[in-house]
Each structure stands twice: as structure tokens, then as C-alpha cells.
Image: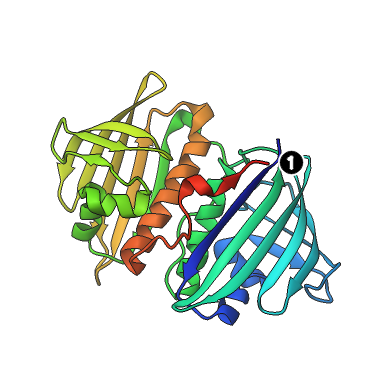
């Protein structure tokens, strides 16, 4: 059954400026893919282009995915055909003006299923849009979709966040703050050894606290599919109200590790945007971003 992923994200930057990030290779490299190559005549209706790389939404052997521009509006929208995983999919990008800047919207239609090579298409698009928000708002980009295998079932992710470690830690353990970047309206957190740490779908995490060292470290035990896994989030001050966040999850079944890495990447990009900009920025809830015919 063909699926459609559709979502928008608020960006505190003018529409024309955000649109510049859509069809320029050096801008695309900061939020969407390692490389992009357009027709020598430039991106126009009917022209071909290719994109791909280590952190594209779906992995492809060089020279990348062959696409065709189908239409668009000057400084507002572009649509392209993307033959993907045996299906002829279509992507529509649109930038709309809003009172605080603009809203970038993506519709990826006719997908052959929920899963890409890096995890769920939905999670991968959210990672990309979260990076576009950060970049267009003159902040640092961070995690990317990644299709590389994870030997040993150990997930490692590092993020630089523009907030002090104490504030990052609070966002991890304060239920009211946690709800604002995980999209779970009622997470359960008991920030003490043995306390519960529960985030409902999309993550559906039901863990217990092993360690809670304010401003420094949070460690959790999370049984998954009948096997124990351990999650550790370590924080390090980088000066100037910046923190390094070092995420580690050990003991994950290798078959599930790549998709789980993408889901965590989505959450951590959201955490970064929440702490730096006050919001993840998505215009609709997670559960409304995938549509079946």
C-alpha cells in the first residue's frame, strides 16, 4: 500500500531565504544530502538532477538517485520525481510566509512502505527538516539520517546544543519540558534510582532509572523485545552556554538498531531545536504525518 509522508516546520527566517536552501548544493549539504548535482542549465522544469551520499534519506550507490523536476513556483515551491526502492515517488517542497518568518512543508507521496534504508521515512524527514530549521535560523546543524550498519548493536550519537548542561538535563527529566520535545503529552519521569522513565509512542520507551546525576549524566535500563538494553546520556560543558550531549544505547538487537538510531536522531534534533529556539517547530503531531490511501 502506497503511503504519503507530509509535515511542516516553522522557520524563523524569510520565505525567500529558506527557499534558497532547497536547490543549491552547498545548502542542501547542510540539511538534506551529502551531494547534489543539477543540470548545467540549472534547476528548471523538465531538467534532471541527482543527489545522495552517506546521509541521504535513502542510501544509493554512486552517482546517487536520478530525479526530475516536475514543476514549481519562483521562490515558493518545487516538485520532483524520485524513483525510489522500486516505486515512482513524488516530493513536493513548499515554503509559505508566516507571521514569524515562514513554514517549510514537504509531501512525499507514493512511498512503497514506511521503512527507508535508515529507518522510518517519517523519522528521516523529521531529522532533515529539523536541520533545515536550525541552519536557516543561523544555528548549527547536527544529526543526519544514516544507513550505515551498527555492528554489535551499540548506538552512539553526539550533539552540540546551545544551552548549559543543567538546562539540558532538566529537559530530560522534567515531564513538562520532556513533553514539549518528545510529543508525548504525559511522559512519566521519576528522576531517582529505580524510578520509572516512560515515553509513549512514537518512541514507546518504558525504562527505569539507573543513575540521575543532575547536569552530568542520566542512565536508564530499557528492556526491548525481551532483552536488556542500557541508555546513557552524558553531558559536558563546552563553554558559552553550550553543551556536548553524548548518547549511548547498548545491547540493541542489530536488526532494530539502524531504525532506532534514526528515531533517536529525530528526538535529539528536536531537543536541540527546543532548547535553542523554544520549539521543535513541527506544525502537526507525529501521528498525523503519515497518511495511507
Q: How is the image coloured?
A: rainbow
Tell me: residue 132, above or below residue 260: below
Name the element at disc 1: loop
**Percent position (x, y) of residue 142?**
45, 59
Q: Which picture quadrant has residue 154?
A: top left
Q: Which picture quadrant has residue 104?
A: bottom right
Q: At x 48% / y 34%, what residue is drawn?
A: 257
Q: Which of the pair 8/142 is nearer the observer?
A: 8
The residue sitting at the front extreme is: 293
Query: Can you identify the residue that label 1 sits on?
Result: 85
**Percent position (x, y) of residue 27?**
60, 71
Relative placement, left or right, of 139 versus 63 is: left
Q: Which of the pair 190/66 is nearer the observer?
A: 190
Relative placement, left or right, of 238 versus 151 is: left
* Mark 1 nearby-residue class (10 Å; few <14, some 14–19, many ≥20): some
**Percent position (x, y) of residue 193?**
14, 34
Q: Quadrant of the C terminus?
A: top right
Tell me: residue 219, above or below residue 252: below
Tell me: residue 243, above or below residue 192: below
Q: Which of the pair 28/1 is nearer the observer?
A: 1
Q: Which of the pair 49/115 is nearer the observer?
A: 115
**Percent position (x, y) of residue 46?**
86, 67
Q: Is residue 25 visible?
A: yes
Amino acid at each position: 500500500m502506497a503511503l504519503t509522508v507530509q509535515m511542516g516546520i516553522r522557520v524563523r527566517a524569510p520565505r525567500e531565504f529558506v527557499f534558497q536552501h532547497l536547490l543549491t548544493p552547498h545548502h542542501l549539504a547542510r540539511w538534506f544530502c551529502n551531494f547534489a548535482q543539477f543540470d548545467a542549465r540549472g534547476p528548471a522544469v523538465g531538467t534532471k538532477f541527482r543527489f545522495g551520499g552517506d546521509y541521504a534519506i535513502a542510501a544509493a550507490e554512486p552517482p546517487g538517485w536520478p530525479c526530475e523536476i516536475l514543476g514549481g513556483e519562483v521562490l515558493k515551491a518545487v516538485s520532483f520525481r524520485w524513483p525510489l526502492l522500486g516505486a515512482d515517488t513524488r516530493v513536493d517542497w513548499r515554503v509559505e510566509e508566516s507571521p514569524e518568518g515562514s513554514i517549510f512543508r514537504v509531501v512525499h507521496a507514493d512511498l512503497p512502505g514506511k521503512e527507508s534504508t535508515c529507518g522510518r521515512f517519517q523519522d528521516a524527514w523529521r531529522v532533515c527538516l529539523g536541520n533545515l530549521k536550525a541552519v536557516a535560523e543561523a544555528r548549527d546543524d547536527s544529526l543526519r539520517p544514516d544507513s550505515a550498519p551498527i555492528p554489535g548493536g551499540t548506538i552512539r550519537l553526539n550533539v552540540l546544543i546551545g544551552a548549559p548542561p543543567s538546562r539540558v538535563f532538566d529537559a530530560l527529566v522534567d515531564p513538562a519540558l520532556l513533553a514539549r520535545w518528545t510529543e508525548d503529552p504525559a511522559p512519566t519521569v521519576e528522576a531517582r534510582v529505580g524510578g520509572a522513565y516512560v515515553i509513549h509512542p512514537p518512541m514507546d520507551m518504558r525504562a527505569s532509572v539507573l543513575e540521575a546525576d543532575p547536569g552530568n549524566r542520566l542512565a536508564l535500563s530499557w528492556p526491548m523485545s525481551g532483552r536488556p538494553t542500557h541508555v546513557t546520556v552524558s553531558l559536558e560543558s563546552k563553554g558559552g552556554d553550550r553543551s556536548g550531549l553524548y548518547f549511548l544505547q547498548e545491547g540493541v538487537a542489530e536488526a532494530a538498531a539502524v531504525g532506532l538510531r534514526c528515531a533517536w536522531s529525530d528526538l535529539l534534533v528536536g531537543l536541540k531545536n527546543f532548547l535553542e529556539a523554544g520549539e521543535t517547530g513541527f506544525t502537526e503531531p507525529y501521528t498525523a504525518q503519515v497518511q495511507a490511501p
